[in-house]
Image (tube, rainbow, N blue to C red):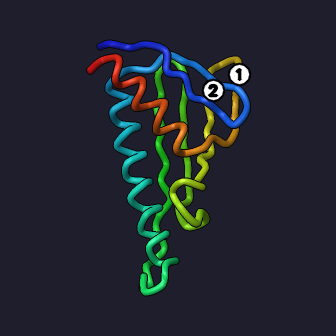
Amino acid sequence: MSSAPLTLNLVEGSVSFSFSVQAARELKAALDELMARLKAVAAKATPGGGKVAPQPPVEYRYTGEVFLEIFCNPNIWPTPFAAKVLLTVRDVTIRLTTEAELTRVIEDVNNYLEQFA
């Protein structure tokens, strides 16, 4: 299976780690689901949007050379473009937990997948 380093750009700095194409596809699917939930929440905030039930949070986990977790509660962001995700990357020697802008994470994953298209 093909793999290459995935680089995720953070608010300040970036983090890179080995990641498989299959895992990137699964992450993209989770991010697409999150974007749909964020749009549903944003729709209720617009006039005439009606009442929308709270959306469940999205949580993605990957275990490979590193452990990656991405979590977001779509109910706390006014628009998908304002949303941030909680990002955790860890292995046996280091753990990084920070926020990242959702739109940047989506862009980084899409750029990664383009290498293998």
Q: Does 83 appear above or below 6?
A: below
- Place of residue 60 in the rendered image (x, y in percent of width and height, measured from the top left): 47, 43
Residue holding disc 1: 94
Q: Is residue 20 left or right of residue 63?
A: left
- Give 94 or 72, whichever is nearer the viewer: 72
List the residue tagged with mark 2. 90
The residue positioned 61% from the left and 39% from the top of the image is 87
Q: Is residue 37 left or right of residue 116?
A: right
* Mark count: 2
Q: Whole-percent x and y of residue 94?
A: 71, 21
Specify the farthest residue to the left: 117
Q: Is residue 80 above or below residue 62?
A: below
Q: Is the residue marked by circle 1 packed among few (<14), some (14-19), or many (20+) residues within 10 Å?
A: few
Look at the numbered disc 1 and give the secondary structure of its residue.
loop
For the residues labelled 1 and 2, the Cα–Cα distance comes to 6 Å
Residue 80: mark? none
Residue at screen point 65% across, 25% down: 14
| Residue 52 sits above or below residue 64 on the image | below
Residue lying at the far front in this picture: please name it: 47
- Check disc 1 and give the amino acid type: Ile
Is disc 2 placed on a helix, strand or loop? strand
Question: Which quadrant would residue 36 be assigned to in this image?
Answer: bottom left
Task: Check the picture and name the quadrant holding the C terminus.
Answer: top left
Q: Are marks 1 and 2 in contact (CB under 8 Å)?
A: yes
* Residue shown at 34% from the left, 23% from the top: 114
Residue under the point 55% across and 48% down: 71
Give the vertical position of 47 relative to 28 (above or below). Answer: below
Which quadrant of the structure image shows residue 69?
A: top right
- Image position, residue 12 (x, y; %): 73, 32
- Judge by depth and name the residue closer to the eye, 24 or 79: 79
Residue type at mark 2 is Arg
Q: Quadrant of the N terminus?
A: top left
